[in-house]
Each structure stands twice: as C-alpha cells, then as structure tokens.
Image (cartoon, helix red, strand yellow):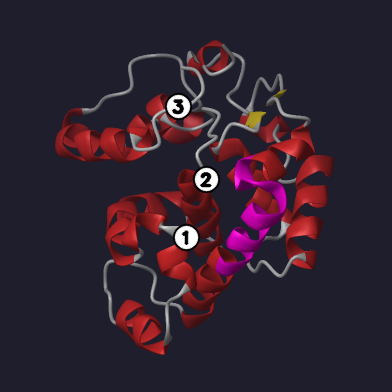
Amino acid sequence: MGIVSDPDFRTKQSAKSVSSVKSVVQTKNSCSWSTSDPMMIVYHDEEWGVPVHDDRLLLEAIILDGAQAGLSWSTILHKRENYRKAFHQFDPIKVAFYKEKDVKRLLADAGIVRNRLKIESAINNARRFLEVQREFGTFDKYIWSFVVGKPIINKWRTLKQMPATSPESDALSADLKARGFKFVGSTIIYAFMQAVGMVNDHVVTCFRYKEVGR
C-alpha cells in the first residue's frame, strides 16, 4: 500500500473494519504483535507503517500516541473512534480553541482515557501544531524533514531487534519539546514514526514489509 492520499482513508477503513473485525483471522506471515486481537490485525494489515502525509491524520496520531503513554496501543486503538468523536475528528483549529468546559466534557467521557494531563496536552499540542503549520506550511513538511522526506527501511527479523528509539526520534522529540509539545518523548515519537510510515518496522518476513515500501 502506498502513500495515503485520501485524508479520510483511515477513518473510512477503520469504520469499515470495526463492523467486521470479529471475523478477522490472521492467516499470513505477519508481525507477531498483531496476531491475536482482531482489531490489531486489521490495524497492522491496513494502516501501520503506511506513509501518512495528511496533517489531520498526523495530529490524530501524535495525540493518540501521547494518550498511549503507560498503556497498550490496543487500549487506545479500541477507543480511537470515541477519541475521534470527542475531539471533533482531530480538527486542529477546533481542538486548539478548546476551553475548560471542553476539558470537563472530556474528563466525563468514559470512551477515552480520562487523564487531565493527557487531555490538556492534546489541546496544547493542537495549538503548537498550528504554529508549526504557520512556520512550515504543513506539519507534514516539518516532520518528514527529519527522515529527509522518505521512510527509513529497516531490516529486522525479530521484534527483539527493534529499538524503542532512534537518532531520528531523538532529534524530532527534542525539537517538538523545544516547540512546547507535551507527551513527545523519544519512545512515544518512535512509535509515532512507525505508525505513520516514517519508519518501516515490519519484520522482513511479514507480508506487509514489501507492500508498505512500494
């Protein structure tokens, strides 16, 4: 699968997948982390590692990866549709202008992780996101510059070989922190980079390894 050119692609795919996810069974050689939870299988097979260049989806990814801190990605993935509804589909302008009443609304929403620091960081990050857009034209242009505009193609054979951070995630994390972003440590940012295809970390035996590299 190539670059996501349709900004609603992942929203459409995940909505379609949710309705049929109970019947999903992994039958191909795949990354071992994706072989039990049906929703994780769909996410791995259709989204993870596919290069993303749509700013709204990039904001969604960076906020959700921050929400994941201390939790499993499966937990956040199962709440993703609730997050999209609660955060106005991650429209950066709408989220950036959230007030205390919105924070209270989100803290009362059982469909998301009700952590004040994470909710406030999401709002803060939307504001910083808009500042980056004003400076660079798009957030996409800014973050992809840290990998010189193209995915890093790794060649891991097992998950044990896969690092938690990289020099690129260290650099991006440091720059995001300097710009005032929150919940953007290097480990979180490496997970973000994996998710949005800045890094291809499918193991080489996974059927998606070559597909996402096309």
Taking depth in this image into account, of 26 and 136 the one nearest to the observer is 136
Coordinates of residue 210 in the picture (x, y in percent): 56, 11
Q: Is residue 194 magenta?
A: no
Contact flag, marks 1 and 2 (Cβ < 8 Å) = yes
Residue type at the position of mark 2: Asp
Q: Nearer the viewer, residue 130 or 86?
A: 130
Establish if 192 lies above or below 47.
below
**Can residue 36 be seen here?**
no
Q: Position of residue 20 (x, y in %)?
A: 16, 32
Comes first in the chain, label 3 or label 1: 3
Magenta region: which residues?
127-140
Quadrant in the picture for residue 14:
top left
- Which residue bears the numbered disc 1? 92
Image point 43% across, 33% down: which residue? 34
Mark 3 lies on a secondary structure that is: loop
Residue 41: percent from the left, percent from the top? Answer: 36, 31
* Residue that mark 2 sits on: 55
Q: Residue at x 76, y 33 (%)?
A: 147
N-term-proximal mark, 1 vs 2: 2
The residue lying at 35 percent from left, 32 percent from top is 9
First-in-chain label (3 vs 2)? 3
Give, as a three-letter code, the residue at label 3.
Ser
State the image coordinates of residue 140 (x, y, percent, origin top left): 62, 41
Question: Tag on residue 159?
Answer: none
Q: Is residue 119 above or below residue 212?
A: below
